[in-house]
């Protein structure tokens, strides 16, 4: 009772204390995000500037020195692009697509979920039937279909991933918000004559959002994987803005001929990043699970 | 129960109808088939003639109804690329896809569930920590990259298993299947493992959290207090409760597995419907894409329906309400 | 105490059980507890929440959480040191020597297995009966536990039966191997008072027949008085006092026990205030709060006290459950043609068991539920349904407020205590930030909480304290009428007494009119002037408490009174 309220940072730190893997994951995520943001300043070359590329530098193994004098730590691809630089730029696109898609998609999902729980009636029916429709259809197929319809491109991939992200959040938020709606503090707010909008934003939202925050990292890592898959299949981002998935696809043709570095390094970075996010996501989920709280 | 089945059937039909509208609008309206099919040298008259031939100059509703009528008669049109009825093309590739999917689910369940229950029951053991980390790594590797690693490892370096194609098939009730001879089976293993890894990880995590949740319920404590053995406690009290979500999710995941087989089949050149879909998307072979989506929706709706009925049968709280 | 008697069945000696906490500190659920139970004896372990009483039962059966540490002492059962057994050694104890009865019968039975399977597996595990013999014995046990139609019940699932029946099934399981001891952990807390009495009678009969000893863990002194030969009083994990039930209740030697006894609401006569300690807040702050609340009392007053503040006529409510996947639409009449008046300054009680519709009545008056057509709710001479303008609606809302049942869900967990109290006033523009903060502090003092604690979040408060914040929030609107929806049912008895005292003080100071809903007849007796008795949505009987709760006319009310645990007060 007499202890001071812990700050948000202290509570956050407490979730991770004693979990070295999750802490490593946090550092990993920070590192990858920083690299993605600062790629244009720290990459050895701009892999999309034709002037900096030389076809004679093509397919060099890791550690080779390029014509421009740069040491290519991770080797080069067929066009003479430095893989390290390509990976840094690819990271940028992969992270951008996934973050934008998941944040926008989740935002839409949260709003729809809250609306369904608060308004009930036909609003809820329409929203939840749409959720059912979406959820009965695997995300990757839906994305394939949308991209087959609208063609490829960064904006279209983001759109397809938004369509993939909203429904599960809407369902989650509605379930939580429905049980919150039954609680007496909502009755108290209604008795106080507060408007529906205020009840939604000040009462329902803050009390229903945590489960979504818990699954958010998992959603982002899923979106990174999905974008990579779509790009690998050739229906994702265009060749002018290659993400990690497209880099892997480009290297795929050389994999069997022993030029493994073109495909393996982008893949490793992809996996490491997704793994970092997932160990953090696991920790958050375990922490949020009442059956495990204080047990580990 | 009957009214439940009927109501559910009604919902399913509406779902299929909505899906058919979406697919129709997506495939035939959003982009103009005339523009896709017309050659560079087409004149305006040629275009009108082509539109006439394709029937796209009619009102949308009429077009949709004739589209629906054709589907109802099993006529999904003719493939631009193969110049054969689409339905035949899909049906002859379906067994290959299902075969791998079923094998993958089998592997996923037999390995995933025991791992999950073990880690749920032994939260503090080092083996549990190892399982937990391995499964996290397992589902962190995107499916297609896993496939590449599998090929690199088992086909390129070890040269144990073939990397692509379906190999020999044996006829079973007139349907060619791969798993009855070694050559076919060896071709099947890598794609199946590729799909199964994700399944194992998901099942393990699912059974783990299910076990943990059930173990803390009052009825588990009470069952221990009344003196029944650990074996029975796990076999009846625990399993009956976690089986319900597992059955549901496994059913739903079958759909996911078939969706992911597009990726796996492409990497391993496995001649199933997934690879057909991707090839058709690349070749703009619309009739196949449309037919695939309609059929797959039909399949998912059927699976969801069966899962719902199973769920109601498994859970007495729903059965006798 | 530790005299070894051949007749001693179980002996708890100097037992201390600790749980390491996440913040590195240690929480001791039990602190050096000693008690003993003779064969065939019924012993009560009584205490309020956090007393550690359930831990004793769990330690005896090896059901403590994995992280519990026995720091000192132990439990001996028939000379065996069960508190230090390995898991596999409990095979001969659980079910065979000791039966266990769980607090909530609805969660103690596995929802996906039949009743039959759950009884028969216990029989198979603990006796030598198998197959048909086991089944026949299961039916016999259910008959003895007074479960009607025992054969049919075997094929049912728990959710198909009532809570009372489930608890009888749990009894049948517990006595199946004729154990020496039954540990009953709050066996009737989840049940209605009329069911409670019958269920306890069955338990006592089964125990006496087979000479089974019982450790009855409860918070309810009434249950102890009915059931137990000997009683131990625990508080915060420590032993307060113990003795034969009658002696201890007649002449408690410790302050806490006296307080506990004084806090029990009496059904036989009304007391002015419960004799429990409870400080009031800072006098200046309190006065300022009272001044604020009384500020516009004059212009809100109706002509005179003879006219009812609230008139309710023909109030009904039908709840319809929508058709779900497996069941057709269903409707039931929760409230059926209820009529009553409430006069200014009085407290009207509504009493009834769960499902009687008593809370629904209040919720309709507040406007949280819409009554069926034909109902008339007249507040201060005006039909509530005729209030349409936004301003009037708001004024009406503020005038009728509610104190809720569940302190753990009635405050917004994401707002500080002060914000919970004054958020709405700020949202309506009634008060600015500064005045709101001032008022929040004053109201906290008014309900007996330190002013400074208004900045704390709800989770930092105990149940009773949260209920006080809820009262402060209701008062902030300067209401005339407050609906109290079982405001103390989730609280310990001493906390309940403090809160009821506070409500009475506030009513005296502010001239509030209260509609007080409760399932507890003795609480209604203490709080209310008049009472309505409800059953299945209808008013069975109404009148002054001194009449209805003393010499009722309706059979139902007589039954309720008869089911009340009876005991002598000191």
Image (cartoon, rainbow, N blue to C red):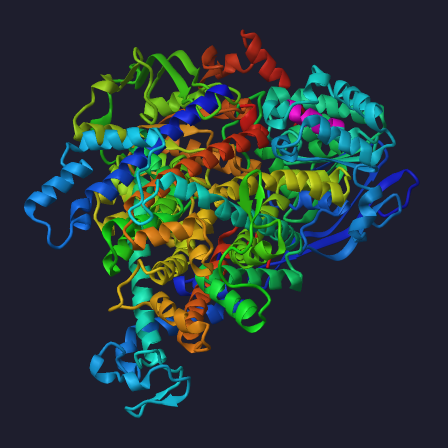
Vertical relation: C553 (above or below) B84: above
Residue at the spot 24% in from the left edge and 45% down from the top edge:
C426
Tell me if residue C417 can be seen.
no
**Which is nearer the eye, B267 or A272?**
B267
Q: Quadrant of residue C186?
A: top right
Q: Position of residue A41 (x, y in %)?
A: 26, 81
**Which is nearer the eye, C258 or A116?**
A116
Vertical relation: B245 (above or below) B280: above
Please tell me whether residue C170 belongs to the stretch shown in magenta.
yes
Residues shaded magenta: C165-172
Please tell me whether residue C491 belongs to the stretch shown in magenta.
no
Residue at the spot 57% in from the left edge and 49% down from the top edge:
B103
Q: Is residue A160 left or right of residue B49?
A: right
**Which is nearer the eye, C328 or C503?**
C328
Q: Position of residue C163 (x, y in %)?
A: 61, 25
Q: Position of residue A169 (x, y in %)?
A: 37, 47
Residue at the spot 31% in from the left edge and 50% down from the top edge:
B81
Tell me if residue B38 can be seen.
yes
Extreme residue toward the bottom, this view: A69
Label count reads 0
């Amino acid at each position: 009772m007499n202890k001071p309220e812990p700050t948000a940072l202290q509570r956050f730190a407490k979730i991770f204390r004693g979990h070295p893997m999750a802490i490593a994951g946090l550092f990993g995520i920070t590192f990858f995000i920083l690299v993605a943001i600062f790629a244009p300043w720290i990459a050895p070359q701009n892999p999309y500037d034709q002037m900096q590329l030389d076809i004679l530098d093509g397919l060099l193994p890791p550690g080779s020195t390029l014509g421009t004098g740069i040491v290519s730590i991770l080797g080069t691809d067929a066009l003479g692009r430095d893989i390290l630089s390509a990976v840094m730029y690819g990271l940028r696109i992969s992270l951008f697509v996934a973050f934008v898609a998941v944040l926008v998609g989740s935002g839409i999902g949260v709003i729809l979920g809250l609306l369904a729980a608060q308004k009930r009636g036909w609003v809820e029916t329409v929203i939840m039937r749409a959720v059912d429709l979406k959820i009965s259809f695997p995300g990757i197929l839906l994305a394939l279909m949308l991209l087959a319809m609208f063609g490829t491109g960064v904006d279209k991939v983001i759109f397809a991933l938004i369509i993939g992200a909203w429904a599960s959040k809407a369902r989650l938020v509605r379930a939580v918000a429905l049980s919150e709606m039954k609680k007496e503090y909502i009755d108290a707010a209604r008795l106080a004559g507060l408007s529906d909008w205020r009840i939604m934003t000040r009462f329902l939202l803050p009390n229903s959002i945590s489960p979504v925050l818990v699954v958010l990292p998992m959603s982002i890592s899923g979106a990174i994987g999905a974008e990579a898959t779509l790009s690998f299949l050739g229906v994702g981002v265009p060749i002018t803005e290659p993400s990690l998935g497209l880099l892997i696809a480009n290297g795929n043709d050389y994999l069997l001929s022993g030029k493994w570095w073109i495909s393996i390094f982008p893949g490793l970075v992809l996996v490491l990043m997704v793994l970092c996010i997932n160990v953090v996501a696991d920790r958050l989920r375990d922490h949020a699970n009442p059956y495990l709280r204080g047990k580990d | 129960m009957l009214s439940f089945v009927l109501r559910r059937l009604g919902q399913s039909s509406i779902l299929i109808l909505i899906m058919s509208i979406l697919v129709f609008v997506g495939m035939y309206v959003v982009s103009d088939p005339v523009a896709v099919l017309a050659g560079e040298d087409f004149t305006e008259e040629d275009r009108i003639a082509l539109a006439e031939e394709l029937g796209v100059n009619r009102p949308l509703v009429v077009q949709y109804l004739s589209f629906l009528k054709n589907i109802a008669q099993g006529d999904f049109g003719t493939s631009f690329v193969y110049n054969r009825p689409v339905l035949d093309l899909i049906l002859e590739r379906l067994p290959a896809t299902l075969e791998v999917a079923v094998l993958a689910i089998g592997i996923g369940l037999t390995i995933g569930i025991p791992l999950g229950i073990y880690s749920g029951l032994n939260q503090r053991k080092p083996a549990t920590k190892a399982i937990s980390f391995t499964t996290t790594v397992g589902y962190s590797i995107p499916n297609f990259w896993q496939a590449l690693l599998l090929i690199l490892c088992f086909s390129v370096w070890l040269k144990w298993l073939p990397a692509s194609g379906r190999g020999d098939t044996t006829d079973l009730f007139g349907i060619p299947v791969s798993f009855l001879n070694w050559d076919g089976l060896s071709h099947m293993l890598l794609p199946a493992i590729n799909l199964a890894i994700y399944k194992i990880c998901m099942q393990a995590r699912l059974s783990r959290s299910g076990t943990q949740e059930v173990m803390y319920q009052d009825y588990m404590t009470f069952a221990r207090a009344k003196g029944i053995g650990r074996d029975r406690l796990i076999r009846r009290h625990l399993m009956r409760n976690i089986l319900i979500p597992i059955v549901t999710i496994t059913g739903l995941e079958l759909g996911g597995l078939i969706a992911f087989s597009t990726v796996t089949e492409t990497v391993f050149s496995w001649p199933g419907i997934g690879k057909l879909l991707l090839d058709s998307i690349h070749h703009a072979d619309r009739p196949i894409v449309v037919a695939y989506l309609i059929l797959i929706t039909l399949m998912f709706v059927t699976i969801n329906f069966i899962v719902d009925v199973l769920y109601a049968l498994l859970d007495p709280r729903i059965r006798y309400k | 105490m530790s005299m070894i008697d051949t007749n001693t069945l179980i002996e708890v000696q100097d037992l201390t059980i600790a749980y390491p906490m996440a913040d590195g500190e240690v929480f001791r659920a039990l602190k050096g507890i000693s008690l003993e139970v003779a064969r065939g004896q019924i012993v009560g372990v009584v205490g309020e929440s956090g007393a550690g009483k359930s831990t004793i039962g769990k330690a005896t059966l090896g059901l403590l959480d994995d992280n519990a540490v026995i720091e000192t002492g132990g439990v001996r059962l028939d000379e065996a040191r069960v508190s230090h057994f390995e898991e596999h050694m409990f095979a001969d104890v659980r079910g065979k020597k000791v039966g266990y009865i769980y607090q909530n019968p609805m969660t103690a039975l596995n929802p996906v297995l039949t009743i039959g399977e759950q009884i028969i597996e216990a029989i198979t595990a603990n006796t030598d009966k198998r197959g048909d013999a086991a089944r026949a014995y299961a039916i016999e046990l259910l008959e003895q536990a007074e479960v009607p139609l025992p054969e049919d019940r075997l094929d049912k699932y728990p959710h198909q039966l009532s809570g009372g029946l489930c608890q009888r099934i749990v009894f049948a399981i517990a006595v199946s191997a004729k154990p020496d001891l039954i540990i009953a952990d709050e066996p009737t807390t989840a049940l209605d008072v009329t069911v409670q009495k019958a269920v306890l009678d069955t338990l006592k009969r089964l125990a006496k027949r087979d000479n089974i000893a019982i450790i009855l863990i409860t918070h309810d002194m009434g249950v102890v008085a009915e059931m137990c030969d000997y009683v131990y009083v625990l508080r915060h994990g420590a032993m307060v006092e113990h003795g034969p039930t009658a002696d201890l209740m007649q002449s408690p030697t410790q302050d806490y026990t006296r307080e506990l006894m004084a806090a029990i609401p009496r059904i036989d006569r009304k007391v002015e205030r419960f004799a429990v300690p409870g400080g009031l807040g800072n006098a200046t702050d309190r006065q300022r709060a009272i001044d604020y609340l009384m500020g516009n009392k004059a212009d809100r007053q109706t002509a005179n006290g003879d006219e009812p503040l609230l008139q309710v006529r023909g109030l009904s409510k039908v709840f319809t459950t929508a058709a779900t996947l497996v069941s057709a639409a269903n409707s039931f009449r929760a409230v059926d043609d209820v009529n009553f008046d409430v006069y200014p300054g009085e407290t009207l009680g509504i009493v009834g068991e769960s499902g009687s519709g008593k809370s629904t009545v209040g919720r309709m008056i507040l406007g949280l539920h819409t009554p069926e057509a034909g109902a008339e709710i007249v507040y201060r001479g005006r039909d509530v349904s005729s209030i349409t303008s936004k301003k009037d609606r708001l004024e009406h809302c503020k005038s009728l407020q509610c104190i809720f049942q569940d302190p753990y869900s009635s405050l917004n967990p994401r707002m500080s205590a002060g914000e919970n109290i004054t958020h709405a006033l700020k949202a309506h523009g009634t008060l600015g930030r500064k005045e709101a903060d001032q008022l929040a502090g004053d109201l906290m003092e008014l309900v007996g909480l330190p002013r400074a604690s208004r900045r704390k979040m709800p989770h930092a408060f105990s149940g009773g304290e949260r209920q006080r914040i809820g009262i402060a929030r209701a008062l902030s609107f300067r209401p005339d009428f407050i609906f109290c929806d079982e405001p103390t049912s989730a609280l310990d008895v001493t906390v309940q007494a403090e809160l009821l005292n506070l409500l009475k003080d506030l009513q005296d100071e502010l001239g509030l009119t209260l509609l007080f809903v409760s399932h507890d007849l003795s609480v209604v007796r203490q709080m209310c002037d008049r009472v309505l008795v409800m059953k299945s949505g209808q008013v069975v009987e109404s009148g002054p408490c001194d009449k209805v709760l003393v010499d009722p006319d309706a059979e139902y009310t007589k039954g309720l009174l008869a089911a009340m645990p009876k005991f002598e007060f000191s």
